[in-house]
Image: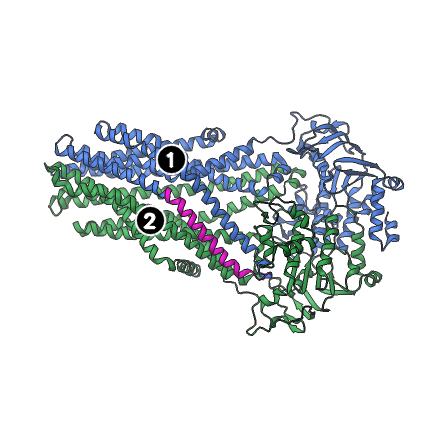
Chain colours: A blue, B green
Amino acid sequence: MEKQILRECRAVRWPLALSVLAGLLALLATVGQMALLSWIVAQVFLGRAGLRQVAAALVALLVTICLRAGLVWLREFWARRAGSRVKSEMRQRLFAHLLRLGPLFVRDERSGELVATLNEGCERLETYVARYLPQTVWSLVIPLLLLAIMWPLDHLSVLLLLITGPVIPILMIAVGSYSQKHIQRQWTTLARLSAHFLDTIQGLVTLHLFGRSGAQEARVARLSEEYRRRTLKVLRYAFLSGAVLEFMTMLAIGLIAVFLGVRLINREIPFVQAFLVLLLVPEFYRPLRELGTHYHAGMEGRVAAKRIFEILATEPAVNEPATTPSPLPVAPLTITCEHVTCRYAGSERPALQNLTFTLPAGSCTALVGRSGAGKSTLVNLLLRFIEIESGAILVNGLPLDRLPADLWREYVALVPQRPYLFSGSIRDNLRLARPEASDDEIESAAELAGAASFIRELPRGYDTEVGEQGLRLSAGQLQRLAVARAFLKQAPLLILDEPTSSLDPESETLLREALTRLRRERTVLVIAHRINTVAAADQVLVLDGGRLVEVGEPAALLEQPTSAYAQLMTARMRGAGALPGKEAEAL
Amino acid sequence: MTRKRSVALRTAWRLLAFLRPFIPQIVVTVLLGGIMIVANMLLLSMASYLIAGAAIVTMIVLLSIPITIVRLMGLVRASARYGERLLSHNVTFRLLAHIRVAVYRRLAPLAPARLLQLRSGDLLARLVSDVDELQNLYLRVVAPVLVAVLVTIVTYWLFAVFDPALALIAVAFLVISGLALPLLALRLTRGLGREQLALRGRVNVHIVESLQGMSDLLAYGQATRRREELAAWEKRLDRLQRRLAVAGGLQEGLQELLTGLAVWSILVLAIPLAVSAQINRVYLGFLAMLMLAAFEAITPLAQAFGQLGHSLAAGERLFRIIDMPPTVSDPPQPRALPASSSLELAFEGVQFRYEEQGQQRTLTDISFRVPAGARVAIVGPSGAGKSTLLRLVLRFWDPQAGRILLDGQDLRSFALADLRRLMGVVTQDTYLFNDTIRGNLLLAAPSATEEQLWRALALAQLDDFVRQLPAGLDTWVGEQGLKLSGGERQRLAIARALLKDAPILLLDEVTAHLDRLTEQALLEALNTLMEGRTTLLVTHRLLNMERMDEILVLDEGRIVERGRHEQLLARDGLYRRLWEVQNALLPLA
C-alpha cells in the first residue's frame, strides 16, 4: 500500500523524504544533547567543576537544543506538506476519474459514499502519509540507530534492550490482531448508536403523532447504557495489554538502571557513560510507542487508500477512440440504430435488446413506454454514458464510437425532467450550456424558453441564488430553465425528457409553446408523457421490456386496432371518461 | 469581539455543567492520570539518582530504597494507566448517554414545527455529530488540563524541596509551554483555520454538486472546466496549508525548544547551588530528569486547545437549536377530549403565514366545515398552501387569526398529545424507523395483538407482501434490511393509521411519487381507511374526486372554488384547467 501511494503521488516523495531525514537528524541532535547533558552532570558531580568550567559545554548544549528544535520544526513542516499534497492530488485524480466514469457509476455507487471518499477518505490518507508513514520508518530505524550508538557505551544494556525491545512490536501485533478487531466492531456499534439517535430525532414528528415521544427517551438512555457496558468489556482487554506494554517498558528501564548501578559500584563502567545510556533508553522506546498511538490512523488510512485505488482502477464504461475522425458529422443529423443491444454492468437481462430505428434529420420522434421499458437507457446510450454491447449507432453514417465522447456531446442538447441546479445565480446556471454566452444571449434564451417571466419576478432576477442553499423552484420552472439551456446551446440533436406528472396550468402552457419553438430545425428525441406531444411527433417508438414493439407515424398507428399505441390511447379515453370530445380534438 | 467571547464563555460554562454528575469519577481519573505521570517522573529521576549514588557508594545495600522505588514505579504506572483508561472511558460513555437524553428532552417539544425547519440542510445530522463531538470535551480537554495542573503542582513541590528558585523556574516553563504556547499557536492559526474551513466547505460543495449533477455537466461538456475549477480551489487550499504547516511545525519546534531550555535552565541554576553545597551534587541528574519527565503532562495540552475549539463550536450549535422556544404549547387547563367517536372539524376565517416568510401570507381567510364522517378534498397547484392547512389541524403551528374548531371547541383548548391522539395521518413522505415492520406498526398501537397487526396489513393490502418475507413481521426496514418501494411504504403508513383507529383522518399527497398502477391500488386501500372517518385529503392528483363530499380549490392561499366534482368541472375555472392538464398525460409512467 505504501509503495502504491508513493508510486501514485510523486509530489509526496520529496517532502516525505525530507521529513524522515529531519526526524533522523533530530534524533542525532538528541543524542548530542544527552551526551552533553551527561558530560556536564558528570563534571559537576564527580569532577567537582563549577559553572565556569562547564560554561562551554552549556553553550554547546544550548546550541544543540536550538538545532534540535529547528529540526523538529522541519520534520513537522515537511510531514504536513506531504500530507496535504497527497490529499490534494488524490482528490483531484479521483474527481477527474469519476467524471470519466460518468453519471451511471456515480448513481450506482451512491454519491454519498463517493463524496465521503473524496473528503474524509482523502483526509485519512493525509494523516496516514503525514503521521503513520514517517513514524513506521522511524520506529524501524531509530531503535537500531540507538543500539549502534549505545553499543560502545555499554554492551550489557544493548543486549537487554535487544531482548525486551521486540516484545513491544510483538505485543502490539497481538493487540492489533485481537482487540483491534473488537475495537473496530465497537466503533461500528457506536456509529450505529448515533445513527439510531438520528433516526429517533428525524422521526420525532411521527413519534409525536403517535404519542410515543416520551417512551423513546428511556430507549435512548437504555441503548447508550447497554453500549457502554458492552464496549467496556472489550476495551478492558485492550487497556490491559496497554498496561502490560507500559509495565514492560518501565521494567526494562528499571532493570537497566539497576544493572548499571551494580556495575558502577564495582567501578566497571564510568558514570558519564552509564548516565548517557540511562538518558537514551527512553528514546529507544519512544518511536515504537508513538507508532502505537498512530496505529488507528494507519489502519484507517489503509482502508481509505484501498477504496481510493479501487475506484481509480475501475474502467470507464465507454471506450474512447484514439483519434478524432475527419470529416466530422455536419448538421442536420440523422441517427440510425442498428440491432443495438446493451446491458448494465452486473445485470443479466439486457436493458435494450436488438433495437433498430432511425431518427431522420430534422424530425421529431416520441419515445413511449412504461417505467423500466428502457427509455432512459436509450438516452444514456445516445449521450455515451453507457457502451453498446452489440450493434451500432450511426451519426450521418459515422459510427458513434469513433467520436470522442466529449466531442459528440457538443452535438447534443439535453433537457432533463429536473435539471440539476448548481449553487450560484440563475444566470450562472444557464451559462453552463455555453460559458462564453453574453447576458443578452442568456436573457433571450430564457425568453424563448418561457422562463423570463418568472425569473423577472424573483427577488434578484437573473442574479437570484439557486441550488441547495438558494431559492427552491417548482418543477415547471425547473424544466423551463432546462429548455433555456438547450436554446443557449444550439445543438443539432435535442433529447428531451418530459415531466411525468402534471404541472400547474401556467407552466404547462408556457412549456408547450417553448418546446414547439425549440424543436424547429433540429433532430429531436422526446421521452413523451403527454398526449399532445405524441400526437404532434413525426414518429412514435413504443418500447416494452427493452424491446422496440412498434414504430410509425402516430396517426397511422392509431388506425391499426392491434397497435399497442392505439390501445394505450383508447385506454386513456376510457380512463378520462368525462371529456372524450375534448381529448379526441387534441389527438 | 467581547460579546463573542462572552458567548464562548457561557457555552463553555454550560458544557461543563454536563460534567457535574460525574465530578467524583473525574476527580479519581485525574488523580490516576497524575499518578501515572508522576510515576514516570519518579522512575526516571530515581534511576538517575540510583546511578549517581552507585558512583559514590561502595555497597548496593545503601541503594535499596531507590532500587525499590524504581522497581515499584513500573507497577504503579501500569496500574494507574489501566485504571485511568477504564474509568475515563466509563465516564465518557455515561456522559454521552446523559447528553443524548438531555438533548432529546429539550428537542422533543420543539418538534414538529422547529424540526421541520431544521430538516433541510442536514442540520439534524449535524446535531447528532455535535453530540458525539462533546464526548471529547471530557476525554481530550477537561481531563488533560486538570492532570497538567496537578502535575505542575507536584513538580513545584518536588523542586521546592531542593530550592524555591528551581521550583519557580520549573513551573514557569511548564506554564509557558502548556498555556502560552498553545495560545500563541491558536492566535497564529485562527484566521488561517477559519479560512481553511471556509475553503474546504467550498471544495465540498463543488464535489457534491459535480457528482449529483454529473449528467448535466457531461451533457454540456463542462467536465474539463469543472476539473480546472477544483484545481484552482485546491491550489488556494494548498497555499493556505503551507502557511498552516509553517505555524504547526513551529509549535512543535517551540515545544521541543522549551523542554530543552527548561532542562538547561534547571542545570544552570542548580550547578552554582551544588557548588555552594546548598544541594547535594548527587541530585543534579535527578533534577534534570525530573524536569524532562514532567513535560509528559504538557504535550497533550496543545491538542486539548484545538479540541476545545471544536467542542465549543459544537456546543454553540447545539444550544442554538435546543434553546429555541417551541412554537405551540399546551393550554394551562386542557379541556377533556370529546367523547364522540365521530367529530366535526371547522375552519373559521383562518389566516396564517410562516415566521420566516415576512409579510407574505400562506393562507388567507380560510373558512370551511368538514361534518362528522364527511370527506373533503383540498386541491390546487403546488405552493397553494394545501399542506400548511393540514399542519394547522395538527397544531404544528397556530394561525395568526381565526380559529380551527374540533367538535365546536377551539383546538388550542386541548392538550397537544390528546389532540394528536384523535388524528390519523398519512403523508407523502412517510417516516419509517430503522426497526422491524412490527416495531413500526406497534408505534401506532403498542398493545396491538398479532391478529390485529395482520388485519391492518390485510386492509392496507400489504399482508401478502409481508408474508413472503423470510422474517415476516420481524423483517428490518431500512439501512440494514429491506428496502421498501414507495408503494409499500405508503401501505405500511396506511396500516399504521388503521391500527391507530383515530376518528379524524388527514391525508397529504399520499400517492405522490408512485406509479399509476400502484396509485390505483393504493386508492382502494385508502377508501377502506376513510370509511366512517372525518377526512381531510390534500392532493394535486384529481383521482376519485367524485367520491368527495366537497372539494376546495386552493390558489395562492385562498379558496378560489368549492363544490362537488361535477359542479366544478362544469364551471370552467381552475379546477377544470387542472383536470385537463392531468388528462393530457399518457397513462403510463
Quadrant of the rendered image containing residue B395: bottom right
Query: In the image, which residues are magenta?
Result: A210-238
From what the image shows, is residue B315 above or below residue A119? below
Quadrant of the rendered image containing residue B368: bottom right
Front one among A201 and A375: A201
x, y percent for residue A148: 27, 27
Residue B84: give its label. Answer: 2
Q: Judge depth for marks 1 and 2 and give the one in front.
A: 1
Q: Magenta region, mostly helix, strand or loop?
A: helix
x, y percent for residue B382: 71, 57
Q: Which part of the image, by quadrant, shows the N terminus of chain B? A: bottom left
Front one among A203 and B147: A203
Secondary structure under badge 2? helix
- Dot 1 amino acid type: Ala
x, y percent for residue A212: 56, 60
Most distant residue in the left direction: B58
